[in-house]
Protein backbone atom coordinates (compact mmCIF):
# COMPACT_ATOMS: atom_id res chain seq x y z
CA UNK A 1 0.00 0.00 0.00
CA UNK A 2 0.98 3.61 -0.55
CA UNK A 3 -0.37 6.85 0.89
CA UNK A 4 -1.18 10.07 -0.94
CA UNK A 5 -0.70 13.12 1.29
CA UNK A 6 -3.31 15.89 1.16
CA UNK A 7 -2.75 19.12 3.09
CA UNK A 8 -5.42 21.17 4.87
CA UNK A 9 -7.93 18.32 5.17
CA UNK A 10 -8.92 15.57 7.62
CA UNK A 11 -11.21 12.58 7.48
CA UNK A 12 -14.69 13.21 8.85
CA UNK A 13 -15.22 12.44 12.57
CA UNK A 14 -17.64 9.56 11.87
CA UNK A 15 -14.81 7.62 10.18
CA UNK A 16 -11.92 8.43 12.59
CA UNK A 17 -10.40 5.64 14.72
CA UNK A 18 -7.77 6.80 17.26
CA UNK A 19 -4.69 4.58 17.44
CA UNK A 20 -4.49 4.92 21.28
CA UNK A 21 -0.88 3.98 21.73
CA UNK A 22 -0.85 1.23 19.06
CA UNK A 23 1.57 3.23 16.91
CA UNK A 24 4.42 5.48 17.92
CA UNK A 25 5.67 6.47 14.44
CA UNK A 26 4.09 7.18 11.05
CA UNK A 27 5.68 3.96 9.71
CA UNK A 28 3.94 1.94 12.46
CA UNK A 29 0.60 3.69 11.67
CA UNK A 30 1.04 2.87 7.98
CA UNK A 31 1.77 -0.78 8.84
CA UNK A 32 -1.44 -1.00 10.92
CA UNK A 33 -3.57 0.64 8.18
CA UNK A 34 -1.97 -1.48 5.45
CA UNK A 35 -2.89 -4.70 7.26
CA UNK A 36 -6.47 -3.57 8.06
CA UNK A 37 -8.93 -4.07 5.18
CA UNK A 38 -11.34 -1.51 6.71
CA UNK A 39 -8.69 1.23 6.87
CA UNK A 40 -8.97 3.79 4.07
CA UNK A 41 -6.17 6.10 5.18
CA UNK A 42 -4.56 8.09 7.96
CA UNK A 43 -5.20 11.51 9.43
CA UNK A 44 -2.63 13.69 11.18
CA UNK A 45 -4.04 16.59 13.20
CA UNK A 46 -1.57 19.46 12.94
CA UNK A 47 0.64 17.48 10.54
CA UNK A 48 2.84 16.56 13.55
CA UNK A 49 2.57 12.75 13.57
CA UNK A 50 -0.47 12.64 15.89
CA UNK A 51 -2.10 9.99 13.73
CA UNK A 52 -5.56 8.42 13.59
CA UNK A 53 -6.92 5.78 11.22
CA UNK A 54 -9.68 6.67 8.77
CA UNK A 55 -12.20 3.95 7.92
CA UNK A 56 -12.98 3.20 4.28
CA UNK A 57 -15.56 5.58 2.81
CA UNK A 58 -14.30 8.58 4.80
CA UNK A 59 -15.02 12.09 3.55
CA UNK A 60 -12.27 14.69 3.40
CA UNK A 61 -13.20 17.82 5.32
CA UNK A 62 -11.31 21.07 5.29
CA UNK A 63 -9.21 21.72 8.42
CA UNK A 64 -6.35 24.18 8.48
CA UNK A 65 -3.10 22.61 9.62
CA UNK A 66 -4.20 18.98 9.27
CA UNK A 67 -3.03 16.33 6.82
CA UNK A 68 -4.77 13.28 5.44
CA UNK A 69 -3.12 10.31 3.75
CA UNK A 70 -5.36 8.35 1.40
CA UNK A 71 -4.51 4.65 1.19
CA UNK A 72 -3.69 3.66 -2.39
CA UNK A 73 -3.04 0.19 -3.75
CA UNK A 74 0.39 0.00 -5.31
CA UNK A 75 1.97 -2.80 -7.26
CA UNK A 76 5.37 -4.40 -7.18
CA UNK A 77 6.94 -1.73 -9.36
CA UNK A 78 6.65 -3.63 -12.62
CA UNK A 79 7.37 -1.32 -15.56
CA UNK A 80 4.70 -0.53 -18.12
CA UNK A 81 5.20 -2.59 -21.26
CA UNK A 82 2.50 -1.21 -23.57
CA UNK A 83 2.59 1.94 -25.68
CA UNK A 84 2.11 5.26 -23.88
CA UNK A 85 0.32 6.77 -26.86
CA UNK A 86 -1.12 5.78 -30.20
CA UNK A 87 -1.73 7.66 -33.42
CA UNK A 88 -3.62 7.04 -36.61
CA UNK A 89 -4.25 8.87 -39.84
CA UNK A 90 -7.49 10.84 -39.86
CA UNK A 91 -9.26 13.52 -41.93
CA UNK A 92 -7.62 12.33 -45.12
CA UNK A 93 -9.75 14.44 -47.45
CA UNK A 94 -7.90 17.33 -49.08
CA UNK A 95 -8.15 20.76 -47.50
CA UNK A 96 -10.04 23.44 -49.44
CA UNK A 97 -7.69 25.71 -51.40
CA UNK A 98 -8.89 29.25 -52.06
CA UNK A 99 -7.94 30.99 -55.29
CA UNK A 100 -4.85 33.17 -54.83
CA UNK A 101 -3.80 36.11 -57.01
CA UNK A 102 -0.97 38.51 -57.66
CA UNK A 103 -1.62 42.17 -56.92
CA UNK A 104 -3.42 44.15 -59.65
CA UNK A 105 -1.15 45.73 -62.23
CA UNK A 106 -1.33 49.47 -62.93
CA UNK A 107 -4.39 51.01 -64.60
CA UNK A 108 -4.27 51.29 -68.38
CA UNK A 109 -4.56 54.64 -70.15
CA UNK A 110 -8.07 56.02 -70.54
CA UNK A 111 -9.44 54.96 -73.94
CA UNK A 112 -10.64 56.94 -75.73
CA UNK A 113 -8.52 59.66 -74.15
CA UNK A 114 -11.17 62.23 -73.20
CA UNK A 115 -13.93 59.97 -71.84
CA UNK A 116 -13.83 56.18 -71.81
CA UNK A 117 -12.71 53.30 -69.63
CA UNK A 118 -9.49 52.01 -68.17
CA UNK A 119 -8.63 48.48 -67.03
CA UNK A 120 -6.26 46.63 -64.78
CA UNK A 121 -5.63 42.91 -64.32
CA UNK A 122 -4.12 40.41 -61.95
CA UNK A 123 -2.92 36.84 -62.44
CA UNK A 124 -4.05 33.68 -60.68
CA UNK A 125 -1.11 32.16 -58.79
CA UNK A 126 -3.05 29.24 -57.23
CA UNK A 127 -6.36 28.03 -58.66
CA UNK A 128 -9.25 27.10 -56.37
CA UNK A 129 -9.57 23.40 -55.52
CA UNK A 130 -11.43 21.04 -53.21
CA UNK A 131 -14.27 23.44 -52.39
CA UNK A 132 -12.18 26.57 -51.81
CA UNK A 133 -13.19 30.10 -52.80
CA UNK A 134 -13.27 30.39 -56.62
CA UNK A 135 -11.26 32.88 -58.66
CA UNK A 136 -13.19 36.10 -59.28
CA UNK A 137 -12.49 39.67 -60.35
CA UNK A 138 -9.36 38.88 -62.33
CA UNK A 139 -9.78 42.17 -64.19
CA UNK A 140 -11.41 45.47 -63.28
CA UNK A 141 -12.83 48.14 -65.56
CA UNK A 142 -13.84 51.62 -64.50
CA UNK A 143 -14.99 54.75 -66.31
CA UNK A 144 -12.40 57.46 -66.75
CA UNK A 145 -12.19 60.94 -68.13
CA UNK A 146 -9.36 63.32 -68.79
CA UNK A 147 -9.67 67.07 -68.83
CA UNK A 148 -10.15 67.56 -72.54
CA UNK A 149 -10.74 70.91 -74.25
CA UNK A 150 -10.75 71.96 -77.89
CA UNK A 151 -7.63 73.72 -79.06
CA UNK A 152 -7.86 77.48 -78.89
CA UNK A 153 -5.12 79.90 -80.02
CA UNK A 154 -4.20 83.07 -78.22
CA UNK A 155 -3.74 86.24 -80.29
CA UNK A 156 -0.47 86.75 -82.13
CA UNK A 157 2.23 88.80 -80.50
CA UNK A 158 3.67 91.86 -82.25
CA UNK A 159 6.29 91.31 -84.95
CA UNK A 160 9.89 91.47 -83.86
CA UNK A 161 12.23 93.94 -85.51
CA UNK A 162 13.57 92.78 -88.85
CA UNK A 163 17.04 91.25 -88.63
CA UNK A 164 18.40 93.52 -91.40
CA UNK A 165 17.40 96.85 -92.85
CA UNK A 166 17.62 95.71 -96.48
CA UNK A 167 18.09 92.69 -98.78
CA UNK A 168 15.59 90.39 -97.01
CA UNK A 169 15.91 89.81 -93.30
CA UNK A 170 13.67 87.89 -90.91
CA UNK A 171 11.18 88.92 -88.30
CA UNK A 172 8.95 86.72 -86.07
CA UNK A 173 5.85 86.71 -83.99
CA UNK A 174 4.39 83.99 -81.68
CA UNK A 175 1.11 82.96 -80.12
CA UNK A 176 0.14 80.66 -77.26
CA UNK A 177 -2.31 77.80 -77.06
Image: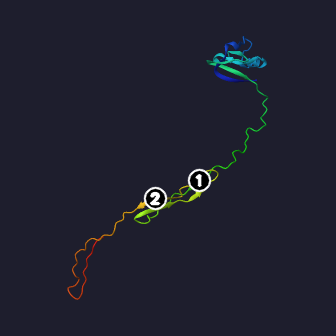
Query: Where residue 167 is drawn, which disc sits there?
Result: none
- In the figure, residue 165 lies in which quadrant? bottom left
- In the figure, residue 62 lies in which quadrant? top right
- In the figure, residue 57 lies in which quadrant? top right
Give the answer, above or below, for where 11 lies relative to 141.
above
Q: Nearer the viewer, residue 29 or 116?
A: 116
Give the answer, above or below, for where 131 lies relative to 170.
above
Residue 87: x and y in percent read 72, 42
Q: Nearer the viewer, residue 67 or 28?
A: 67
Residue 26: x and y in percent read 71, 19
Rendered-image quadrant of the N terminus: top right
Q: Is residue 49 left or right of residue 32?
A: left
Image point (68%, 48%), residue name: 93
Rendered-image quadrant of the C terminus: bottom left
Query: Where residue 142 is drawn, which disc sits there?
Result: 2
Q: Is residue 39 left or right of residue 169?
A: right
Give the answer, above or below, for where 23 lies relative to 163.
above
State the SS at label 2: strand
Q: Do we see residue 39 in this rendering? A: yes
Label 1: few (<14), some (14–19) or many (≥20) C-alpha neighbours in 10 Å: few
Query: Where residue 134 is drawn, which disc sits there?
Result: 1
Q: Nearer the viewer, residue 81 or 100?
A: 100
Label 2: few (<14), some (14–19) or many (≥20) C-alpha neighbours in 10 Å: few
Looking at this view, name the residue that lies furthest to the top.
20
Q: Is residue 82 left or right of residue 124?
A: right
Q: Is residue 171 left or right of residue 81?
A: left
The alpha-carbon separation of the residues under discs 1 and 2 comes to 23 Å
Q: Nearer the viewer, residue 87 or 78?
A: 87
Task: Give the colour scheme shown.
Answer: rainbow
State the SS at label 1: loop
Q: Which of disc 2 and disc 1 is earlier in sequence?
A: 1
Amino acid sequence: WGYEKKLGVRCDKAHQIPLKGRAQTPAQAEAICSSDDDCGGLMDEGCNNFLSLCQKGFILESEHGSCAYEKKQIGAGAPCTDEISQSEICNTEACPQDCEYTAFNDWSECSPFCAGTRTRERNVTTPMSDGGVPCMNISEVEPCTNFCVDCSWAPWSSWTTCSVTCAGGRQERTRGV
